[in-house]
Image: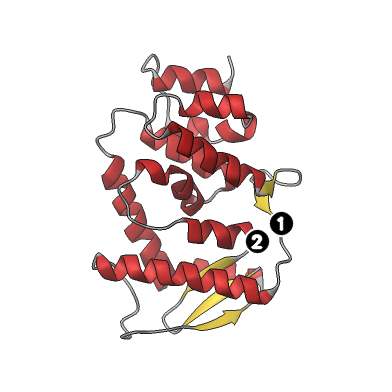
Amino acid sequence: MTLLDDWIACREGRVVLDSSHFLGLFKEHGSDAELAQIFAGFAQADALQARAQQVLAAGSLDSSLYLLPQRGCDEGRLKAAALAWWNEQARYCLSTQGPWPEQAHWQPVVEVVSREVALKALQSDAPNAWVFEHFADTVIEDVRDSQLPMYALLEALYGIAADYYLAWYIAAPLLALEVDFARYFELWRLGGMSVVLQDRLLVAG
């Protein structure tokens, strides 16, 4: 039995397995034919497969447990991509009364920092964490009553790169969440990451 066999059995309701069982699904079964089997039965299966193929083609598993994008993009492109994702986060949070820094019409100072500094900032109690929780709560509410194993699918997608935003980009055709996660994918594809703080936007490559 392969992980793909387990997935098909779970999707068809023949077995019940913990969602975490499927964290390695896309790393072990990433061919076009296997992706078609994984998404079979889901609405928008073709769109899901196309997004998964796009993400898998944008990174490499050669030296990591998780998919990593190519790094080394110039700062100008990184800053532009980070600001585009920042604007999308702001739009959604403000339209849904979600958490966001309170300054009216705030446009952040974009500060390029080392990856170590950005990762440390990610662990802090900052707007970046509040925004993520707001998005996550909305996704959980959206898929709560699904008859298909949506939680397992989202965990499997998370397992590609240990990144829920990237998982939500792939799953977006199934979600009612009106967020353009393509802006996040573009930042990730360039090897970038960003952190929303109260007074600035950190960007690392």
Q: Residue at x 30, y 48 (%)?
A: 176
The x, y position of residue 113, in whole percent, is 63, 77
Asked whether 74 or 21 is in front, the reply is 74
Name the residue tied to disc 1.
70
Q: Give the image quarter of residue 194.
A: bottom right
Q: Which residue is drawn at 36% across and 53% down?
A: 136
The x, y position of residue 9, in whole percent, is 44, 17
Indicate the secondary structure of the residue bearing disc 2. Answer: loop
Indicate the secondary structure of the residue bearing disc 1. Answer: loop
Answer with left or right where residue 44 lies relative to residue 190. left
Query: On residue 49, which mark appears?
Result: none
Look at label 2 and name its amino acid.
Gly
The x, y position of residue 200, in whole percent, is 48, 82
- Badge 2 crowding class, 10 Å Cα cut-off, few under 14, some 14 to 19, many 20 or more, is some
Labelled pair 1, 2 in contact (Cβ < 8 Å): yes
Q: Quadrant of the N terminus?
A: top right
Query: On residue 191, which mark appears?
Result: 2
